Image (cartoon, helix red, strand yellow):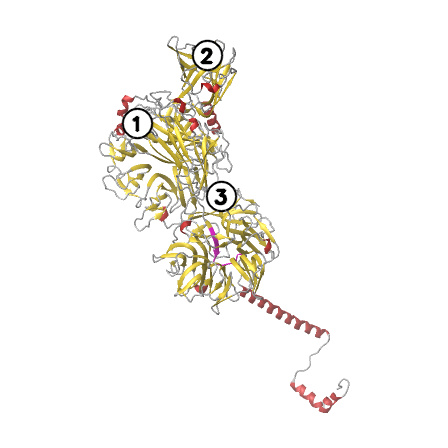
Amino acid sequence: MRLRSKRRPAPGSDFSSLTSLAASVIAFAASPASAITFTPVPSPNLDLSQLGRIALAGDFSGISLYQYEEQNEHLFRNNGSEQLLARMPNDLFAPIVNTDATIRTMCTLDTGNGTVVVLGGNFTSIRGPDHGAPAMQSNAIALFNPTTAAVTPLPGVSGSVNALLCDQDRNMVYLGGSFVGANSTNALAWESGRSWVNLPFAGFNGPVMSITKASSGNVVFGGKFTGLGNASTPSTPDSQVINLSTASISAGSSSTSPGFSDPNNIVCKTSGGDGAGNTWLLSDNVAGFWQAKFKHGFRPTKLRLYNTHEDGRGTKTWRFTALPINGIMNFTYIDPATNQNASCTSECPLSDDNSIQFQDFRFVNEIGMNEFRIDISAWYGSGGGLKGIELFADDIYSYAINDFNEPSCAGLEFPSSATTTGPWVVTPSYSSTAQYLSAQLTAPITNTSASVVFTPDIRESGQYSVNLYTPGCIQDNTCTLRGQVKLTGQMTADPTKIQPIDVDLYQTNNFDKYDQIYFGPVDASSSSFRPQVTMTPLAGQSLSQMTLVAQRIGFTLINSTGGLNGLYEYTPGADVNPSEFMQSAFNRLGANFSTGSAVSALATSGDVTFVAGNFTTSDSLRNIVAMKTDDANAHRLDGGLNGEVKSLFANDISLFVGGTFTSTLDNSAQGLNNVAVFDTSTNTWSPLGAGVNGRVMRVVGMTMNITSSTPEVVVSVNGDFDQLLAFGGNPALEVHGFGVWVPSQGNWLENLDLPLEAVDGVLSASILNFTGGHSLYAGSLSSSTLGANDAAILGSESLSRLPVDIEPSASSASSSDLTKRDGTFFGGDVSGVVAGLFDTNNGRNLTILGGHFTAKATDGSTIHNLLVLDGSDNDRITGLGEQISSDSTFLAMAVEGDILYAGGKVTGTANGANVNGLITYNLASKSFNTQPPALEGGNGTVSSIAVRSSTKDVYVGGSFSGAGSLDCSGVCFFSTTASQWNQPGRNLHGNVSSLLWATDNFLLAGGNLTINNTSPTFLARYDATAQTWNAYPGADQLPGPVSILTAGASDGGQIWAAGISSQNGAAYLMKSDGSTWQQAGQSALQPGTDIRGLQIFSLTASHDSSDLVNQDEALLLTGSIVLSEFGSASAVLFDGNNFTPFALTTSESPDEPGSISRVFSERSDYFAKSGGGHMPLVFVVLIGLAIALGLILLMVAAGIVLDRVRKRREGYVPAPTSMIDRGSGMARIPPEELLGGLGRRGAPQV
């Protein structure tokens, strides 16, 4: 079967080659054309004309027909990775670019080669949408061409990009974030055609969170910084000691003298004494080398050498080669003979003065390395040698592997260190800069499963950037096992001085990355306090297994040109003069912020720039203000908001605001609850409904078709909340940190009773209707063309809602105690609509849904698990009342006459009688009637109901051993005429999951069964005439219990069966022609497949021939069908050769697809064809009789005509018919002559 579908450089290190970047951009411009397109799939060609209304029932919150190859059920990702998304023609979101982390910002720039989209975030890789497309390393920023769909990494930035501004006037892109690039920190520019451009300032000493262009044309940066600046060298440089004691030491041409041949002799030997065991010597009069190889990378700043004087020997000249780059390093040093600065490269001198304990050589260039070699080229006396060596650096790290931290032999008071708990093992460095620790954890994942406490050697207090370095997952093949970590720590001795570190991060990055986890003051180490960072797994992750990695944490001291506080206005092209900072209204506003303030969001609308974040000014402005181009003063927006603002979205006169606030500062607008809108025309605040019950992190614009075909702007709200608060008659809605506000309706999308799409997940950024293209979105979303809970109407090419109000399905923890085991529903979790039917008997127009759900009745009451929709009474919705337990689950239903038979895991009372497994309900009187005796034994569960058409008897199958006092295992039937239970045959036992009348005399039962107490079988056949059970022909070929049956032909001679294999637990699908079985889908149906329904449909167009399915038919599988090369689908069509997705669903949880349990229809003419329709049987019989009578009359008439023709040919003359003539004739013959010969032999004679 086949499917028809189808290493971060440390701050201050050299910048990546501009040649490489230019080549990337040229490749970007020259990419082959493959613009954003979506491939439609062929129509399924279902013939629904004979079926009346058709519905799909299941457990879902949204449903879509499969119309484009790019559709699937797994768009949302719960591992922190996000995608660039576009809308397909059916309005669903489809990924066009994939990343391994968050896309935090986007903008478009029109270049000479067309429009490009610039993407920024904290990702480390990027790739196209095609399955199996390779991941390209791309740290924090990349380009996307919407015309060609080409993706191009922009190498050279390490860290995270939080904000982008595409300045079309200057053909330039401004970047802001927490990164290093070129000679800048946290701010940089990219110019089309010139690649990276350093701004005239060295960036900022803290992270940039937002960038906007004011109406004046100036660029405004907002963030958490106090000045312009870059990483700073500590006031005490070279303070970090590189650990040589754990390196692999080797040498060439070593002396053979005992005690002087070991190159390890000079490691950790700084006392200055020569001698055996303390000195390493070369052989006499030969050059040689000393080499150290490490399992981590470093950037040394100073080399300290102790020359030997053993027996007049010593090193005279040497050189230092960095490996693996094989570069000879340049040094500066103080010449001890002249006391003057000097420099050297390949022949650096070393003094033989006994009074000089050591000499320091400073590296001219800070180059990363993990190995080095010292070559001795000239010597004093008989040969060279050394008695000590030390290596120093400025970079402050604490490694998870203690061997990489500062050595204990260095005699440091507070050396860097790490302590661990948990099952850690050392992992090779692969392509990373250092080896690291890995821990394999199993569920449940808690914060005590493993831990690392990083303790750095902080020599001086100051402003630091604290960064966590995480190795990529591709190199160690753990991407599917990576999860989240929690970082906690205290950076100051006074815990009230600054908020402690409390950060959650994903470790799902494909390549090495670093994340800034803290920016602020850090106190130097002392006997009473040491800064520490603790890393643990984030508790509560839904992972059965998790790989936790720990490498290092770095502390970078920040220097700055001060005078700023979270805001900086930059005039492009102008020189930067710190003395002129206060000439800018924005800079003055920032200087007026309280200490520790931060600007999180900026937005410009017309001549007004809105500044928002977490700040307070001396004149009592809080968290949001407005700045006008022609006005030097900040304008209060009702004094601001009483909590932090995290995000802004400006649309026309509306400014949408998200954060952690409840009202304006002057209380003129209350009940804002974390999200609000400010009307710039009336200067008034309004809530979005009643807001949400937690922090809002992002407000992002979207477009949707709400009431017309013209898209309108709506607003997505993302954050740490789980409820849209109740307002104005709208109840509170449970959500997963996502909601969509529809301004034109004044309501949340989730509250609107309209046939609209369903969207859930995370939306980080958007570009609405950019030049030359449609809207683009960044995030991780699941979407469906129709938002509907658990049931939908199926049209020929469309879906529509049922007019019912079913609440979103509860989590599995609160759903009923049913599940599928061995193909039957006994004991586990089931939710949603499991069964349904349309009832049109006796003039009714009812839609009945059963399962495990909660819904609202028309009178406002709550319905549990079974509802009746009356189309003849204005779609009135009713339930069963409170008599049936709300914990019940209905799995099967049937109507006979006026009576509804509904079975499942059902308990409660009806008319005072206990019920178990089955209830009956009078649909005409809308009341319970006298109940059949309750089912007993087993699980008391009914899984299937089948009515025998000739007798109207109702057969039920499931897990039970009796009904009332009657023994009947697995199958019983209720006589509707005698109103009593009966046992069909006496030789069947076991659990039944599916019943099917193949003909009126033969009933099939699938499940885990035994016949005659001796013969196990997965499929049995009941002969109603003989009243006996037998194994179905060939049932021994079935690999496991049958859970679903359906007819394969209208005469019942063929059947389809599905179930779960007893051997390997895999789903199977098989067809029987009455004697032999054929398997279907062995290679296409993947592990995890759960087939819950089967149904043959007629088609309007033929497909390729197959031995399994007629050319004008197709088999529909429903459930959760996992197909190779596609993934899961909730409904799939099988034409005998190919499996094709038919319907896809989403669930209330955005990271899980939904499922479809059943398809049900008003009429069951599934084998009927549409060529003019089919006449009822009674009319066919009458017409046949009429034709037969007509033919008989024609034959009689023809016979009379032919008889007359014959007689004429033979000369026949009609006898006289006159009574007179007859009378005269009789008179002339005497009677005795006429009758006298009767007694004689021979022929009578006249």
Taking the image as drawn, is residue 896 in sight?
A: yes
The quadrant holding residue 867 is: bottom left
Disc with the residue nearer the chain's start (2 vs 3): 3
Figure quadrant of the C terminus: bottom right
Q: Which mark is residue 68?
A: 3
- Mark 1, residue position: 226
Taking the image as drawn, is residue 1099 in sight?
A: no
The answer to whether residue 588 is left or right of residue 233 is left
Q: Are marks 3 and 1 in contact (CB under 8 Å)?
A: no
Q: Is residue 940 magenta?
A: no
Foreground of the two, 557 or 82? 557
Kindly report the distance in space between the C-alpha atoms of the residues bearing marks 3 and 1. 51 Å
- Mark 2, residue position: 310
Q: Which residues are magenta?
A: 1156-1166
Q: x%, y% of residue 1183? A: 56, 66
Q: Which amino acid does the dot numbered 1 rest on?
A: Thr
Q: x%, y% of residue 164? A: 37, 31
The answer to whether residue 1218 is left or right of residue 187 is right
Other residues around mark 2 within 10 Å, as few (<14) / some (14–19) / many (≥20): many
Other residues around mark 1 within 10 Å, as few (<14) / some (14–19) / many (≥20): many
